[in-house]
Image (spheres, rainbow, N blue to C red):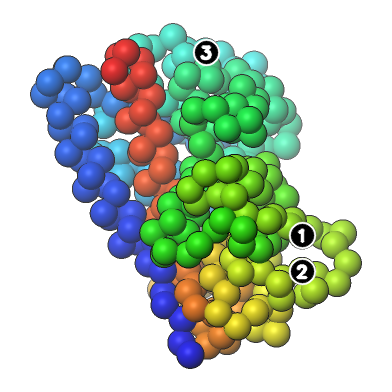
Amino acid sequence: MSAKIISGKEVAETIRKELKVEVDELKEKYGVTPGLVTILVGENPASVSYVTAKQKAAHELGFYSIQDNQPADIAEDALLALIEKYNNNPAIHGILVQLPLPRHVNETKVLYAINPDKDVDGFHPVNVGKMVIGERCFLPCTPHGILELIIRSGAQTKGAEVVVVGRSNIVGKPMVNLMLQKRAGGDATVTVCHTSTKNMVEHTKRADILIVAAGRPKVITADMVKDGAVVIDVGVNRIGKTPEGKAILCGDVDFDAIKEKASAITPVPGGVGPMTITMLMKNTVQAAKQAAGL
Ligand code: L34
C-alpha cells in the first residue's frame, strides 16, 4: 500500500484563500487591517527563511506588516523595550519573536513581555495555560496546523492511540495537550516519547497517529511504524546544499520507506511547515478582530 500524501501546502493555500476573503471584508466593512510584526534577532539561515515566508504570506493577505531585524548582540533590555513599543502600537495586532534567540537573551523573559492579546504564537504562559484547560486562546502555530491536517485527513482521533515524539515547548508539549482535549480532533489516548524513553519502538508501533518532532533527520524508520498509521513529520532538517547553494531538507521520518506502510503521511518540505505559517496568519486575523471588539 502506498500512503496518501497529506499536502500541507495545498491545505495551507485553501485556508489562506478563506482568510483573504475575511481580511478583505474586515478592511471594507470595519476599516480594520490586521497588523503583524516579526522580530528576527541575528541571521540564522533557517530563521531568515521562515520569517521571510511569514512576511510574504502577510503581504499576500494584505496585512500591515513589519519585518524588524535586530543584531545578534542586541541587549536583552533593548529587545524588551522593542516589544513594549509594539505592545503599545494599536496598528500591530500580532507580535512574533522568531526562536531560537541568542544565548545571552532569556527567552522566557522575552515571551512574558509580549502582551497576551498580541501573542499570535501562543507562547505566553497565559495562552499556554488557557490552552491546557481548553479555553479559547491563541493556539501555537505548528501544533494548530498539525491538528488542522489531521482533521482534514479524515483520521479518527477519538479513542485513537496518538504517539508524539518530542517534548519541546513549541511542538511536543502543546501537541500532547491538544490531542487530549475532549472535542473534535482530540479525545485521543496520548503517549509522549523523548530522549530518555526506553524502547521507543514499543510505543511508536502502537500509534494510529504518529507525530514526530524530534529535530533529528530520519530517526523514525519503517520498522517503528504500524501498518496503516497516519504519520505527521514535523522535522525540517537541513542536511546539505545543492550545487546551486539551496538547502537540502529532510524530515524526522524515513519518508520513502514509511510511505509504503502508512495510510497517510506528510512530506518535507510541503507538509507541516506551510501550515505553521498559515496558522500564524489565522491567529493574527483573530487578534485584529478581538482588538476591534468583533
Ligand atoms: N516564535 N519561532 C517562533 N514561532 C514559530 O512558529 C517558530 N517556528 C519554528 C522555529 N521557530 C519559531 C517556525 O516558524 C519552526 N518554524 C517553521 C516555519 C516554517 C517552516 C518550517 C518551520 C516552513 O515553511 N518550512 C518549509 C520549508 C522552508 C525552507 O525551505 O526552509 C516546508 O515546506 O516545510
Secondary element under disc 1, as helix, strand or loop, is: strand
> Mark 3 is on which residue type?
Glu
Q: Residue at x 46, y 26 (%)?
A: 95
CA gap between label 1 and label 3 equals 37 Å
The answer to whether residue 12 is left or right of residue 248 is: left
Image coordinates of residue 119 in percent, x first then y, are: 50, 26
Q: Earlier in the sequence, mark 1 or mark 3?
A: 3
Disc 2 versus disc 1: nearer the observer: 2
Going by the image, does 48 lie left or right of 190? left
Is residue 124 positioned above or below 253 on the image?
above
Q: Is residue 57 above or below residue 162?
A: above
Taking the image as shown, residue 193 lies to the left or right of residue 63, namely right
Which residue is at a point 15% across and 32% down the rendered structure image?
24
Q: Position of residue 53 (x, y in %)?
A: 37, 49
Residue located beneath label 2 in the image: 203
Distance (Cα) linking label 2 and label 1: 8 Å
Neighbourhood count class around disc 2 (C-alpha, 10 Å): few under 14, some 14–19, many 20 upward: many
* Disc 2 to disc 1: CB gap under 8 Å: yes
Residue beneath disc 1 = 193
Please state which amino acid type lies under the numbered disc 2. His
Give the Cα separation between the discs numbered 3 and 2: 44 Å
234, 45: nearer the viewer: 234
How packed mark 1 is, by other alpha carbons closer than 10 Å (few <14, some 14-19, many 20 or more), is many
Q: How many numbered markers are drawn?
A: 3
Mark toward the viewer: 1 or 3 = 1
- Element under disc 3: helix
Cβ at disc 2 under 8 Å from ligand 1: no
| Amino acid of disc 1 | Cys
Residue marked by disc 3: 84
